[in-house]
Amino acid sequence: MGDVDLDFLNQSDDYSRKYQKIKDNENSKIQTLIVTALQSLGGSGNTLFSTADPRQLLDKVDAALENSGWKPFSVLPAKQENKIKKVKAREDSSLSDLTGSILSGEKDCLAPAYFYRGLFFMVLEEFQSALYNFEEAINCNFSGKDEYKLHHKIAQCYLKVKKYKKSREHLTIGIEKIKKAKLSEKQKKDYCKILQESLQRIAKKTDKQDDSLNLITNPHIKDKRLSSLVGIKFTETQGRFCVAQKTIPTGTVIFQDEGITPFLNPDDKETQSDFCLFCMKPIENNP
């Protein structure tokens, strides 16, 4: 038994596979079962244990335990449901904590969690993901003195993906939010100046043509990556998840998103270097 992971086996719900360490008897589930079973039979001095034949002994013990009303699962701790860890969203929260806060579905935490997670993606230069999180923050009624910052960040992301019209829209909203924010007059003046200068720099720029393939014919109102045929729900144990709103025809695209990284012909090593993994164009005269 030297190579058997006793701790792992003792944590299993399969009681036929359990073992115990002598020094940890008080924590062993199988030890608890044996002790309570003996107690229900009146202890090891019970005359039925004098039966020599093992098969007969097991049959007698089984019958006696059944008559005594002993239930093995009643002496073990009830299995607890796995619940989503609830974490309060803060500016210094980790990305995993922010995601956990979103999955928990706490209404007061959703908007700031999306906002701070959007900032993470901006640092990673994943601007589409950042935009999704910022827009979700708006959908969750993000408010307060940082509201102008949210629109400024959205404008910066749209600028990075060359969508100047949307960038101008959010810069304009940001300026209006500054005017209504609880800031000193000097702060309002300085912040408005920054956004107005940004607005002037892109005033005449036109959007880059979007040549991406959009396969979602009727996007979801809250998440344009999803089809409207799919709904978003929440439970304490599962967090947020998707369900079918109605019958979905075979072949319907219900979700579309950008890939994390391109990888062509993973099973064909001879052609892996025939295409650029950034632009997907064939490589000629590869050095």
Image: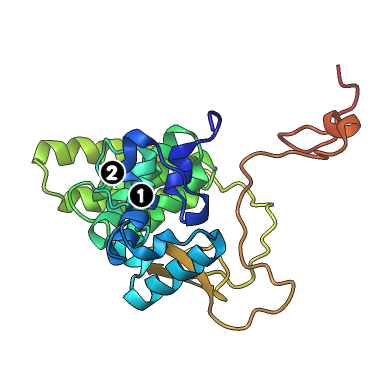
**Residue indicated by mark 2:** 26
Question: SS for tag 1?
Answer: helix
- Image point (39%, 42%), residue name: 96
Task: Kindly indicate whether the residue at mark 1 contacts the one at mark 2 (C-beta within 8 angstroms).
Answer: yes
Say if residue 14 shows up in the picture: no
Residues at marks 2 and 1, CA–CA distance in whole angstroms: 7 Å
User: What colour-coding does the image apply?
Assistant: rainbow
Q: Amino acid at mark 2?
A: Glu
- The residue type indicated by label 1 comes to Gln
**Camera-nearest residue between 214 and 82:** 82
Name above or below for residue 48 compared with residue 228: above
Q: Nearer the viewer, residue 176 or 156?
A: 156
Nearer-the-camera pick, 148 or 203:
148
- Left or right of 237: which side holds 280? right
Question: Which residue position is annotated with label 1?
Answer: 31
Labels in figure, total: 2
Residue 140 position by quadrant = bottom left
Q: Nearer the viewer, residue 174 or 217?
A: 217
Find residue 217 and report its horizontal and vertical position in percent.
64, 71
Q: Report which quarter residue 244 is drawn in.
A: bottom right
- Which quadrant, please, contains the N terminus? top right
Instruction: Please state if 153 lies on the left or on the right of 59 as rendered.
Output: left
Q: Which residue is depicted at the point 53% across and 66% down? A: 56
Residue farthest top in this picture: 287
Q: Which mark is residue 211?
A: none
Q: Is residue 16 above or below residue 272?
A: below
